[in-house]
Amino acid sequence: MGSETAGPGAVTTGLLPADRQPVIIAARRTPVCRSNGALKDLRAHQLLAPVLKQLLEASGVSPEDVADVVIGNAVGGGGNVARLALLEAGLPVGVPGLTVDRQCGSGLDAIVLAARLVAAGGNLVYLAGGVESISTAPLRAHRNGDGGPDFFSRAQFVPLSFGDPDMGVAAENVAARFAVGRDRQDAFALASHQRAVAAVRAGRFDGEITPLETPAGTVSKDDGPRPGLNAAVLKRFPPAFVEGGTVTAGNSCFDADAASAVVITSLQRARELEAEDGLLVVATDTAGVDPELLGIGAAMAGGRLLATLGLTSARVGIVEFNEAFAAQALACLDHLGIEPGRANADGGALALGHAYGASGAVLVARLLAQARASGEEGQLALALISIAGGMGTAALLRYEKITGGISR
C-alpha cells in the first residue's frame, strides 16, 4: 500500500498518503478459554462488547467517531453480532456494524477489510476483529423432506466433488504430502505450550487481555497452556483422525471461546489522536488452494504477498501463525523458509486454543504486543492463517512510532 519511503529493515515499496495509510493503534483480546469452560455462559456479543469498550478507552477514540464495526464470526447464529455487540458496548445507535464470515480467517479478514476501507479514504476510524462462542453456538440443521431437522456438526465448505475433508483429515493430508512426521509435530506442540507457559508466568499477556465477568467470577487468564506437558505424554496420544496417522489430540488445537479486536484508522487520524505507535498495514493477500490440502493456504497467501513486495521471509521480524494443527503449521513455515522457532514466540493455538472467527484477530493483538515490547521501529510483522474450504490469508504489518514521525 503506498508512496512514502521506508527505512532500514522495512518494506521498500513505501506507504499510502497519510490520510489513507491504515494503521492499527490499539488491540485487545479476551482470555482464550476452552469451549464449555470458563466462558461457557457468555454469548458471542457478551465476549466482544467489553473488548470494544476497552479499545475506545485505550485509544481515546470517541464512540461517536467510529465509522463502522467490522467483526468476523464463523459458527454463530447470524443476526449481525457486530451490531449487537457494539450496542451492548454502549456505542451510539448511529454506529453501524458488519459481520463477515471467512471461517477460521474471519477475524483477520475483518481487519483486512477495515484496512481497505481506510485506504479508500475518508480519514475514518474503525473497530475490527473477531469473536467466537463455540460454547453457545446454535445447533444447526437442514430440513428433511418432512420438514424435520437433520442436524449437522459443520457447514459444507466446498462441493463434495472436491472432497470437503474434515479439518483433522485435511491435516493428515498435509502431513503426508509435505512429509511432516509425528516427532516434529509433537515437538512443535510441546514448544508451543512451553512458550505460552513462560509468557503467562512473565505477564506478557496481561496488557492485551480484557478480563470478563462471568456468573462464576472474573476470568482474566488463558486456560490452555499446560505446564506439566512433556514429550512422553504427547507420545501416548493415539492418531485422532486417520488410522495409522500422525495427527493426534496432543498436536492439534482445542476449540475455544474468545474475542479480539483492534482500532484501525489512517496515519493522519492516528497522529490527531496522539497515538504513540502502531502497526502500519503494508499489504495483505488471500489465496485459494486445493481443499484437500486446506492447511497449506496460509503459506500460499504469505508466499505470494512477500514475492509481490520483493521480500524474503528473512526480512520479517515477528511471525504469528494460527496453529490449528502442528502438521499444517510446520508445512507452511517450511514452505515460507521460516524456522519454527521464529513463529509464535509466546505460544500459539496449540497451547492457547482456536476460537475460529476470533483467532485471526488474536494474531494481530499478539503482534502489536510483541512489536511494542521490542520497540524496534520499521520491524515487519506477519500474520498467517489457513482457512476451511482451501484458503489462507496473510497480512504484512510494520511497527512504527507515530508521534515522532515515520522512519525513512
Image: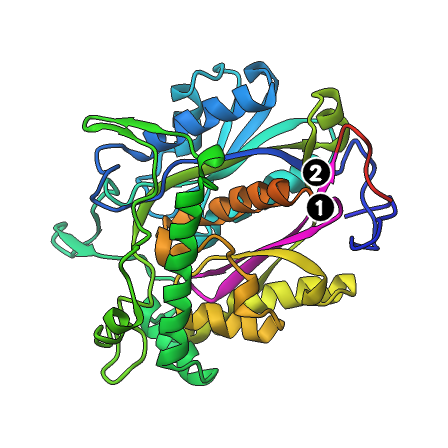
Question: Could you tell me how far apart the alpha carbons at marks 2 and 1 are, in whole angstroms?
Answer: 19 Å
Asked if residue 383 is among those painted magenta in the image, a careful observer would answer yes
- Look at the numbered disc 1 and give the secondary structure of its residue: loop
N-term-proximal mark, 2 vs 1:
2
Location of residue 182 in the rendering, given as x and y in whole percent from the top left corner = 35, 80
The mark lying in front, picked from 2 and 1, is: 1
Location of residue 244 in the rendering, given as x and y in whole percent from the top left corner = 25, 85
What secondary structure characterizes most of the magenta part?
strand
Location of residue 375 in the rendering, given as x and y in whole percent from the top left corner = 68, 42
Quarter location, residue 80? top left
Residue bearing mark 1: 376
**Which label was assigned to residue 22?**
2
**Which label was assigned to residue 158?**
none
Q: In this orientation, does residue 166 appear? A: no
Q: Residue at coordinates 64% horizontally, 45% vertically from top-left?
A: 374
Q: Which stretch is magenta?
A: 377-401
Q: Residue at coordinates 84% horizontally, 49% vertically from top-left?
A: 7
Q: Nearer the viewer, residue 307 or 82?
A: 307
Compared to residue 81, the image places residue 336 above or below, namely below
Amino acid type at circle 1 is Glu
Q: Nearer the viewer, residue 99 or 293?
A: 293
Compared to residue 48, the image places residue 233 above or below, namely below
Q: Quadrant of the C terminus?
A: top right
- Look at the numbered disc 2 and give the secondary structure of its residue: strand
Q: Residue at coordinates 75% horizontally, 25% vertically from top-left?
A: 271
Amino acid type at circle 2 is Pro
Asked if residue 106 is among those painted magenta in the image, a careful observer would answer no
Q: Are marks 2 and 1 in contact (CB under 8 Å)?
A: no
Compared to residue 343, the image places residue 27 above or below, namely above
